Each structure stands twice: as C-alpha cells, then as structure tokens.
Amino acid sequence: MARKIIIDTDPGQDDAVAMLLALAAPDVLDVIGVVVVAGNVPLARTVGNARKVLELAGRADIPLHAGCSRPTRRAPVTAEHVHGPTGLDGHAFPEPTMPVQPQHGVDYLIEVLTREPAGSITLCTLGPLTNVALALVKAPSIAPRIREIVMMAGAEFEVGNITPAAEFNVYADAEAADVVLRSGVPITMIPLDLSHQVLSTRDRLDRIAAIGNRAGGAVAGMLSFSETFDRQKYGWNGAPLHDPCVIAWLLAPEMFGGRTINVRVETASALTYGATVADWWQITDLPRNVHYLRDVDAAGFYDLLTQRLARLP
C-alpha cells in the first residue's frame, strides 16, 4: 500500500521538482494534500506556484491549502535572488485554474492528522516549518499521530547558504524549527551536507530534457535558471538539488546513509540565528531526536528522478 504523505512547501524550483517526483510515484506515495507556506517567495506566489505544479502533473484533484504568510516571530525572509521574482523562473507555466481550499493549512494538518489512523501520515516539509510548528502548538495531541516528518532543513559540515551559519528553511523561521525538533515526532533531516552532493550538472539536465514530456521540459528549464546562482556562488559544475532528496529518501532509502543524533537550533544569537547544531559524534547525552542523512548515491538519485519524471504528462 502506498504511504500517505502531505507535502508542506514553498515552491521554489527545487520544491517543484520534489512535488513532481512524488506525484510520479503513486505506486509508492499517496499525496493526499499539499499545504503551502511563505518562504522562497511570498505566500501569494508560493500558492500560485503549487497550483501550477499540480496542474502540470495532471493532479489538480489534490486538495491545496494556503498556510502561513509569515514566520512565527521574525520578519519574512525570501529568496528571489536565487529563484527569480516568481519563484519558478525558467519555465513559462500557464496561469493555473485549480481551486485553493478555503480551510487554512494549519487547520487542515490538524484535521487530517486527527482523523486518519495514528501513524499513517508522513509530513514532507520542503520549506520553513511554520505551518507544522503552529499545528503542533495548537493541537499537541497530533504529535504522536504523525508517522514521520521528513524535512529538507539544516546544515552542519557544509555551514549555511543564507548566512554563514544557517540554512534557508531553518533561518526563515528558526523558532518554528525549534518547536518541531522538540516535538518528539520521528524526524529524518536532509541537510545541505547531503544535498550539496546532488548536483544538477549539464549532462543530468540534458537527460531530463530529453524525456520529451511536459514535466521533463519544465524541470530542465527551471533548474537551468536556478542553478546559475549556485554555480556562480560555489564554482561547481552543477547546482545542489535540495528538496527532491526528501522524496527520493522515501522512494529509495537504500541510496542514503546517516545516523540518529541530537539536533538543536539556535534562536537567540544575532550572529548564528537559525544554525542547526548536529551532535554527529554524540558528544552530549541529549536525546537523539533526528535521523540525520549525510551520504547519498548521487548518480542513482538522478537515475531515479529521470525515470520517474518520464511517467508524468
């Protein structure tokens, strides 16, 4: 039976690719809903972008809910300098027509996690953790009902990508990340330490473009745009592809390696706000709250991505 997942996202080109990868694997993953949060671009943009991606995949039937338009405490932080003003620059999407559900995304999470059997729903978080944190605060009873949270978040050995210390998704709402990391829910974390190994080189993008369907063309176009910033920044022969690693972990966990450790997030320091402190060597005796992934078969990841995208329209 396919694993039921809810995707919480702030599209973003790499979020869009992650959504498409999940939607291309209905035999393994049952996407029962999508919740959108402000992050890479403001909420109005991320909601529209999620609609475009669902329609591209032919899945306008999936309920889409708008969540939080700003972080829990701090001023909003966005990343148009990476993703472009729309968040999905690089491909010309038609204007979407599918509806957005009237229920707030936080309330949707609470309702579904309360209604569905305990341990049956996995949350896949691709952006700031604001929606999930507020759901946990508003309805603490949902925490033991969540099967797992698989998140693209954090960094330790690769340091930050929005500040010298912090990864963007955590930095955008570190207080929310702190709530989630302390929740007791089983967590698998895909940090920059892993995603920086998954580079969208030109030959990999050419393979995706050669699929010949709408999804392959859109992915190749979007990633060709967004990789420009990272290639200039890092000087590598391709840009890291972050969020799709969340979905790939669920599809092929044998391609990944890591260990269960304690991870905390800094919320007080002006210098290191949003930094994730990963106790990789078990220096402390703090509870091991995160399965922290650090290794990946990058070639296998791109084979999986290309094969699955070929199943979409």
Image (tube, helix red, strand yellow):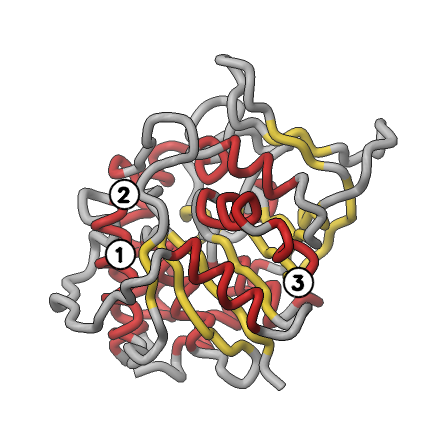
Q: Is residue 164 above or below residue 9?
A: above
In this picture, residue 148 sits left or right of residue 305: right
Mark found first going from the N terminus, 1 or 2: 2
- Give the secondary structure at mark 2: loop
Label 1 belongs to which residue? 47
- Quarter of image, res 255: bottom right
- The Cα–Cα distance between marks 1 and 2, rounded to whole angstroms, is 10 Å
In the rendered image, the quadrant that contains the C terminus is bottom left
N-terminal of the two: label 2 or label 3?
2
Residue 133: percent from left, percent from top: 52, 44
User: Which residue is at a point 19% across and 61% down the rendered structure image?
Assistant: 91
Check disc 3 and report the residue beneath it.
145
User: From this viewpoint, is residue 300 visible?
Assistant: no
Residue denoted by label 2: 41
Could you tell me how far apart the alpha carbons at marks 3 and 1 are, in whole angstroms? 27 Å
Residue 225 in sight: yes
Residue at figure coordinates x 26%, y 70% from the top left: 217
Is label 3 in a helix, a strand or a loop?
A: helix
Q: Is residue 31 left or right of residue 209?
A: right
Q: Residue drawn at (51%, 59%), measured in percent from left and top? A: 110
| Cα–Cα span, label 2 and label 3 | 31 Å
User: Closer to the N terminus: mark 3 or mark 1?
Assistant: 1
- Residue at 46 percent across and 31 percent down: it is 171
Mark 1 residue type: Val
